[in-house]
């Protein structure tokens, strides 16, 4: 066992972990192998990312070949064909208005980049006074200063309140157990919660607002689905007031909801989309902002660059590793696997069996809600009195002991398996969960 102290682990109870370490050693398909040699069925696709399953031979081979051919290509004012090919393929999967991709290295960078693009777009159109963003309670948009400002997960914000972006406000979240508990798919009640946007727009004056950022399905807050009609209302209020609508599809992208993107599942068109995770099936870090053609035109070709020589940089933003060759190779291979193995269609086809299995936990001890869409689901537990989150953590540990990896967020157990999962494995996950729920106090 290595010395565990030097590594400051992210989003982890370091003191507890280092007393009770859980280490993974290898992975293949639906399974991890732990350091003590046990097979662990992965119910959460790593961290909502390994959509093609672990160590997929085609993705592994593509990355191995790439690292031996071109390890790194200077990202600014030089390129390599993989980045252009991947941008082309990703935008072809996305809703038709999203014609351009800006590459980054994570979901957090994608979010902060999207916010900057929104400001640049309005400025290019002579509306530089639009500086405000509207996020949503319980939203998660990564951990950059932009992302935590528009995000709505209290624990991620409270230590950093002094350094938030100015002028950000938040929509109410849409989680409503009283009216919507145990909904299958989109809940029936709550479309009217979108009207809070109209009130915020009035309060702040629409001419000061740059855009709205929401996850079509909140992931990290515990798989909170949009009520029927909610996203459509948000879209129409944005249209009415010239606000850009940004969908954060870092989790929902690349097949999770049974289509390439949740925007397609819900048939609501965003002006920008942030993606990461599944773009490379988690194999190499990568993210992207997919951008409406008119936004790109305004920033790169339109009034934003009027009077500037063609050699002038249009957007002063980017990362050393934007469009990294290994990430692009992994991304191209992942997209080929998704296409050739029909994994988005597979997610849609398995969704009813996944829903049936999860909703079978209704009535199990502690369960106060079950919700699902595509291959994304959650089981919410009654918190222990005075000990929020600990019951769910006990369930996590019990499942891990029984060879199944689930994820907890607050008192919710989230399930987002790789899209290659078999029905019997769905059964195994739900079985392990059922046993854990009976075992924990
Ligand atoms: C919706 C959403 N946005 C952004 C992020 C941040 O991504 P990353 O951890 O790659 O920075 C996440 C991570 O889970 C996410 O779920």
Image: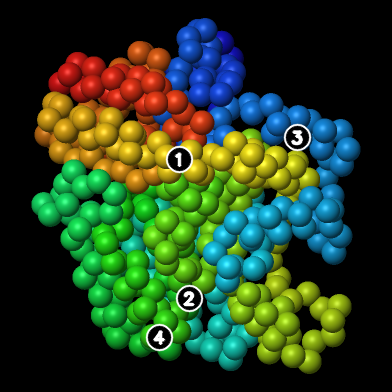
In space, the residues marked 2 and 4 are separated at their CA atoms by 9 Å
In the figure, residue 56 lies in which quadrant? top right
**Viewer can see residue 325:** yes
Query: Is tag 2's residue or tag 3's residue first in the polypeptide sequence?
Result: 3
Query: Is tag 4's residue or tag 3's residue first in the polypeptide sequence?
Result: 3
Q: Is mark 2 within 8 Å of ligand 1?
A: no
**x and y, in percent, of residue 60 in the image:** 71, 29
Q: Which residue is mark 3?
A: 63
At a point 60% along the width and 36% down the height, the residue shown is: 341
**Viewer can see residue 112:** no
Q: Residue 350, relative to residue 213: is it above or below? A: above
Q: Which residue is mark 1?
A: 347
* Quadrant where the image shows the N terminus: top right
Image side of residue 42 versus residue 100, left or right: left
Q: Nearer the viewer, mark 1 or mark 2?
A: 1
- Of residues 87 and 360, which is closer to you in this image? 360
Q: Which residue is mark 4?
A: 241
In space, the residues marked 4 and 1 are separated at their CA atoms by 36 Å
Query: Is tag 4's residue or tag 1's residue first in the polypeptide sequence?
Result: 4
In space, the residues marked 1 and 2 are separated at their CA atoms by 30 Å
Where disc 4 sits, the SS reads: helix
Disc 3: CA contacts within 10 A as few (<14), some (14-19) or many (>=20): many
Query: Is tag 1's residue or tag 2's residue first in the polypeptide sequence?
Result: 2
Q: Nearer the viewer, mark 1 or mark 3?
A: 1
**x and y, in percent, of residue 179 in the image:** 12, 54
Q: Which residue is mark 2?
A: 244
In the figure, residue 385 lies in which quadrant? top left
Image side of residue 189 versus residue 257, left or right: left
Disc 4: CA contacts within 10 A as few (<14), some (14-19) or many (>=20): some
Image side of residue 394 versus residue 267, left or right: left
């Amino acid at each position: 066992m290595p010395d565990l102290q030097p590594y400051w682990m992210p989003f982890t109870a370091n003191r507890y972990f280092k007393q009770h370490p859980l280490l993974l050693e290898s992975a293949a398909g639906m399974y991890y192998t732990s350091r003590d040699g046990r097979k662990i069925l992965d119910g959460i696709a790593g961290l909502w990312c390994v959509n093609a399953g672990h160590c997929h031979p085609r993705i592994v081979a593509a990355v191995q070949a790439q690292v031996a051919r071109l390890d790194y290509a200077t990202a600014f004012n030089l390129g390599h064909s993989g980045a252009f090919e991947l941008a082309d393929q990703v935008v072809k999967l996305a809703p038709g208005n999203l014609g351009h991709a800006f590459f980054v290295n994570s979901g957090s960078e994608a979010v902060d980049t999207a916010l900057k693009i929104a400001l640049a777009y309005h400025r290019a159109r002579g509306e530089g006074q639009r500086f405000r963003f509207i996020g949503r309670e319980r939203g998660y948009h990564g951990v950059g200063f932009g992302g935590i400002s528009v995000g709505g997960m209290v624990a991620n914000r409270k230590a950093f309140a002094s350094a938030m972006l100015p002028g950000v406000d938040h929509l109410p979240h849409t989680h409503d157990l009283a009216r919507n508990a145990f909904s299958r798919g989109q809940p029936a009640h709550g479309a009217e919660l979108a009207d809070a946007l109209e009130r915020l727009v009035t309060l702040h004056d629409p001419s000061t607002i740059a855009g709205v950022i929401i996850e079509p399905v909140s992931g990290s807050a515990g798989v909170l689905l949009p009520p029927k009609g909610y996203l459509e209302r948000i879209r129409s209020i944005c249209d009415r007031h010239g606000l850009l609508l940004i969908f954060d599809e870092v989790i929902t992208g690349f097949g999770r909801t049974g289509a390439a993107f949740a925007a397609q599942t819900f048939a609501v068109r965003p002006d920008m989309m942030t993606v990461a995770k599944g773009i490379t099936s988690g194999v190499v870090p990568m993210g992207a902002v997919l951008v409406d053609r008119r936004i790109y035109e305004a920033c790169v070709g339109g009034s934003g660059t009027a009077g500037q020589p063609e050699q002038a940089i249009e957007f002063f933003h980017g990362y050393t590793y934007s469009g990294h060759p290994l990430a692009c190779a992994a991304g191209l291979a992942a997209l080929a696997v998704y296409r050739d193995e029909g994994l988005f269609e597979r997610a849609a086809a398995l969704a009813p069996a996944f829903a049936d299995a999860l909703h079978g936990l209704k009535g199990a001890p502690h369960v106060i809600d079950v919700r699902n869409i595509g291959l994304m689901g959650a089981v919410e537990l009654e918190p222990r009195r005075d000990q929020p989150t600990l019951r769910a953590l006990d369930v996590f540990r019990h499942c891990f002991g029984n060879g199944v990896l689930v994820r907890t967020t607050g008192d919710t157990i989230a399930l987002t398996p790789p899209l290659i999962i078999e029905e019997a494995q769905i059964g195994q996950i739900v079985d392990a969960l059922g046993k854990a729920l009976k075992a924990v106090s």
